[in-house]
Amino acid sequence: QAKSLGRGRHHFFDVGLRERMQRRLRMEQDLRYAVHDGQLWPAYQPVVDLRTGEMVAVEALLRWTHPRHGAISPAEFIPLAEESDLINVIGKEMLRATTRELAARRVQQGLDLTLKVNLSARQLDDPHLVPAVQDALAATGLPAGALCLEVTESALMRDQEAAAEVLASLRSLGVLLAIDDFGTGYSSLAQLRRLTLDTLKIDRSFITGIAESRDAEAIVTSIIAMAHAVDLTVIAEGVESAEQLELLRALGCDQAQGYHLGRPVSAAELFDQ
Ligand code: C2E
Ligand code: MG
Ligand code: MG
Ligand code: MG
């Protein structure tokens, strides 16, 4: 019986694998085309200061509107782009487009917002990253201090020496640095100190249960205390309810982001109405 079950699974596995590989290959071709066809665009999600209730920053999140398949999640296509040089092309364009947008809004609407842009692990390895950031700032006139680059905890811990070096170079440009999805990796307080970051973003998975679970609340409390001990601004990701927001405020969290405060939308939708 075990044998026939095994055979059956094997068969299904093969079919699934072939389909998945074909889908991937098609998607990579489509993505390559999408970059040049203008199908990729930045959405912006507000980041709110918990003391004043005001929007103090926006996070740029990449969106792909496929002509046939509609919206494709970055969780699906970023890993694909990371397997090739595409992520560097896309990342540079994202930097260019979003710094241009925010610089224009500053001048036209007097908006004093920090722009947050995500960097992938592959981009940290790119020797052209630092000059590309410098170029984007110079070309658009966005002040360096108004740009915050977000790198995930796992990307930072992959090669700590190399990451520390790139972050130091970025920092010397005057930009701010954030550690994203904090809590999902295994970094220590000592490592955090060494990286000279400005902001720590608590991963959504810890915020989800915060209003119901004492454990979740205890974890968030200790992350906030630890971050504040090394002078980091703390942002809670994925705030979906008023209860979570109130609790985070009471725990001394500095800023928050999430569907309860605002979903990622186009620049026009966020700034023009
Ligand atoms: P991230 O940087 O941690 O961004 C936060 C993600 O959580 C976004 O997903 C956002 O839409 C989602 N989110 C925000 N508030 C809520 C909430 O209240 N509930 C829930 N369930 N989700 C919420 P998104 O846009 O799908 O992006 C996923 C990830 O893809 C990002 O995670 C980031 O790691 C990556 N990514 C997005 N844009 C870029 C980019 O331009 N470059 C790079 N390298 N990575 C990007
Ligand atoms: Mg982020
Ligand atoms: Mg995150
Ligand atoms: Mg994430």
Image (cartoon, grey):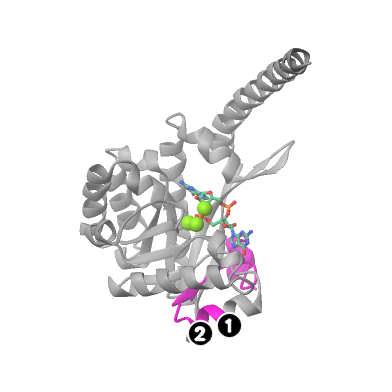
Q: Residue at x 44, y 61 (%)?
A: 116
- Residue 182 placed where, x, y %? 43, 58
Please rate how many residues cluster around mark 2, counting C-alpha atoms within 10 Å: few if below 14, some from 14 to 19, many from 20: few
* Residue that appears at 56% across and 59% down: 205
- 185 relative to 208, above or below: above
Residue lying at 42% horizontally and 75% vertically, measured from the top left: 112
Q: Which residue is mark 2?
A: 250
Residue furthest to the front: 1
Q: CA distance from mark 2 to mark 1?
A: 6 Å
Q: Magenta includes 271?
A: yes
> In the rendering, at what x and y percent does residue 48 appear?
51, 76
Would residue 108 be visible to someone looking at this image?
no
| Residue type of the residue flagged with mark 2 | Ala
Residue 150 shown left or right of residue 161 in the figure: right
Amino acid residing under circle 1: Glu
> Which residue is at the front of the view, 74 or 216?
216
Q: Position of residue 45 (x, y in %)?
A: 56, 64
* Number of other residues with Cα within 10 Å of mark 1, as a class: few under 14, some 14 to 19, many 20 or more: few
Left or right, residue 80 beside residue 107:
right
Among the 4 quarters of the image, the one containing residue 144:
bottom left
Instruction: State the quadrant of the C terminus.
Output: bottom right
User: What residue is drawn where x is 44% and y is 77%?
Assistant: 254
Is residue 164 depicted above or below 67 in this figure? Answer: below
Q: Quadrant of residue 29?
A: top right
Q: Nearer the viewer, residue 185 or 121?
A: 185
Quarter of the image where the N terminus is located: top right
Q: Are marks 2 and 1 in contact (CB under 8 Å)?
A: yes
Which one is in front, 176 or 138?
176
Q: Nearer the viewer, residue 262 or 183?
A: 183
Which range is magenta? 246-273
> Can you identify the residue that label 1 sits on?
246
